[in-house]
Amino acid sequence: MSLTPSNMLKLGTKAPSFELPDSISRTHYSLQQLKGKKGTILMFISNHCPYVKHVNEEIVRLANDYRILGFSFVAISSNDVKAYPQDHPVEMFKTARQLNYPFPYLYDESQEVARAYDAACTPDFYVFDEALKLVYRGQLDDSRPKNGIPTSGRSIREALDALLNNRPVPEQQKPSMGCNIKWRTY
């Protein structure tokens, strides 16, 4: 595991389109099908990363709290499953069911979606407004494994609350930190 920060995609960037299979329903979904009325939260995650395991319960709480307010949540795994078989779609399905993910858990086999979003780590979070313009990217909150700070989702909750109240999202944002995305080598 290599501790890696977010690349911090430029604010205002339009969300790149995609169509990916959902490991839960086995249905292919496009970004347009998944976007929320108030905003869309994309999360690059993986099954094996201890940083994702640390925040899993909070991302489920966050999604459950904000889905009813018009936000959609989408998780994407882009890791090389040959090198990391625990991130295979079958294992993604098991993880999603075990943790009761209230959002699709998409598999980016080609890794093109992760590259389009300049994703670097798991977890890596992106918040887009109703027009799919990037308003937040970075950490869930200040909690990390073993730092003693409980998970709260504070950083993303503040961004979502700003969108709900038609206020600008503060531009000073902290990068997420986690396991690097496991890129395929050719």
Image (spheres, rainbow, N blue to C red):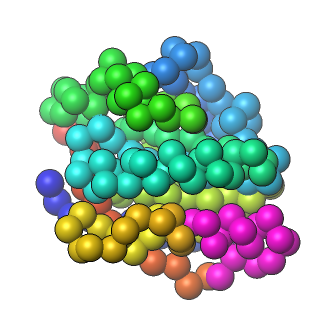
Q: Which residues are magenta?
A: 156-170
Residue at screen point 42% across, 30% down = 96
Does 14 sit above or below residue 170? above
Prevailing secondary structure of the magenta residues: helix
The answer to whether residue 156 is visible is yes
How far across and how far down the image is residue 3, in percent?
21, 64
Q: Which residue sits at x=52%, y=79%?
A: 173
Residue drawn at point x = 23 percent, y = 41 percent: 48
Residue 127 in the figure: left or right of residue 82? right
Outermost right residue: 166
Direction top: furthest residue: 26
Look at the image and say whether residue 72 sits in the magenta stretch: no
**Camera sees residue 132:** no
Foreground residue among 174 and 117: 174
The image quarter in which residue 183 lies: top left
Horizontal and vertical percent position of residue 64: 62, 45
For this view, does 67 lie left or right of residue 94? right
Residue at screen point 70% across, 45% down: 67
Where the N terminus falls, by quadrant?
bottom left
Residue 168 belongs to the span the image colors magenta: yes
Foreground pick, 100 / 77: 100
